[in-house]
Image (cartoon, helix red, strand yellow):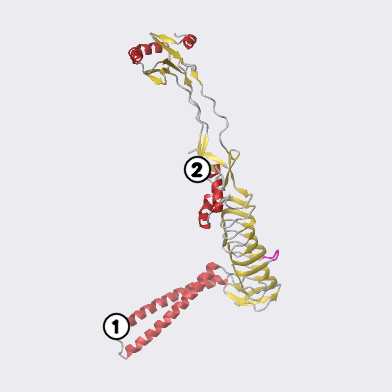
Amino acid sequence: MIDRVQAKQEGILIDEFLIKVSPDDMFLYLEVDPKNPVIINSLREKWEKISAQLKENKIIGVLEDPDFVDNMLIVAKGVAPKNPIPERIELFEKFLPLLKEDKELEERCKEISEEEAEDLRDLCQKIICVKSGEAIGRWYPSIPGTPGVNIWGDPIEPPPLSEKPSFTLGKNLYIDEKDNLIKAKESGVVVIEKDVIEIYPEYTLKGDVNFSTGNIYFSGKKLTIQGDIKFGFKVICEGELELQGSTENKVYIDVKGSFVCQGIIRGEETKVKVKGSAQIKAVEFAIIEIEGNLTITNYLIFSKCTVYGNIIATSGKGIIYGGEIKCSGNIEAKIFGNESHTPTKIFAGYNPELIEPYKKALKEEMKIKEVLERLEQGIKLGKKLKKYGKLSEQKEKILLKLEEEAKKCYNALEKLKDEISNLKKLIAEYKSRTIRILDKVYAGVTLGITDITYTLNEDKSGPLTFYLEADKPSFKD
């Protein structure tokens, strides 16, 4: 048996070859000039004997063929331990922007043209959401290290596994054991903060929607924006939205819940769609569609507004003027119109899904009747000529064609009459809606219930109610 201490100090002498031990006991080697053919040939001739002797002395990892490394000829190698692999999380591509901040992109966005900015507003998204059950990435469990062994056969333990993983998961995330995917328990904003990944169903943006945030596509319970929505940006919100600031022009807002806002202002090209009810302090020059009720806490001016519930503007200034307001329910406000007699159209009981098809059907009916009138004149003349034998064969064919077209018109009219009749019945249910004027309505304002309108030619003071009595516009105190 080889004496380890002596071997490390003096080496192992086999025949004329002095084999040395590495300081870490991980390999045996000879210091040989690789260009010396005499020594190399001699070693090859005696390698079988040397190899056998090393193995007899329990040396581990004796090589079948010695291996040159620099000026060392390695004859035996131990097995190094394999380091452990700590657990890790690999985020999917959608969520990678959360790990890095592209300041260059943000600065570039501020300097480019409006056409280019349209695309970059999506590229620089910083608020990224996940839906309930959606995977944000994959979890890879830790793999323990494998022990090694030196040339003496002594085991070498691998280094310990790091106790702290690179990320920890918050309460709204879980690992699906079937596929190790990291999934959301609730819909919300994905946030990485202090090495913790969490989902926030209710999220507050402490600032504006601009190039530092990009367009926002929110899924969750509630999104609160403490600043403004700047020019050209979108906020698509599947949940409640509270905008504590206001909007600039060309903003698009789509809310699948309730909406509270300080102001939709400077909004000639701003569009707002809300599935639920909305409470807005001030609206200027905007296109708004609300499926629930709309409460205005100051004013609504120069806007195109469609509301499927009621409109209430009884607090603050309570003014509505300019533009066109179509409301399926009742309307109540302090003041309608203004001293400048700005043209203003305000409809209650106006359901666009009924009124628009009804108007279209009436136009179509009128168009068909005009065509039918001309056809009937031609048919009448043709029959008269035929009666007196003055209708040629060619003209008789034309008469038949006219009669065929007239028949088509009669059939189309019958269908339209049924459609108009059904729509009238449905529209009649909305004729009980009212417009309540608390303080004043100015001349020049057109008030309407369903499709029946009345334009005021003088100012009227409130409180009074505009309503229909036997389909006639009327006022009552």
Amino acid type of the residue tagged 1 in the rendering: Gln
Residue 353 at x, y = what percent? 53, 67
Residue lying at 43% horizontally and 14% vertically, measured from the top left: 59
Quadrant for the N terminus in the image: top left
Residue 302 at x, y = what percent? 61, 68
Magenta span: chief secondary structure: loop
**Magenta highlight on residue 51:** no
Q: Which residues are magenta?
A: 313-317
Of 313 and 153, nearer the camera is: 153
Residue ID for mark 2: 92
Q: Is residue 469 visible?
A: no
Residue lying at 35% horizontally and 11% vertically, measured from the top left: 49
Residue 349 at x, y = what percent? 59, 69
Quadrant for the C terminus in the image: bottom right
- The residue lying furthest to the bottom in this view is 388
Viewer-side label of 2, 1: 2
As helix, strand or loop, the secondary structure at mark 1 comes to helix
Of 332 and 336, nearer the camera is: 336
Residue ID for mark 1: 394
Amino acid type of the residue tagged 2 in the rendering: Phe
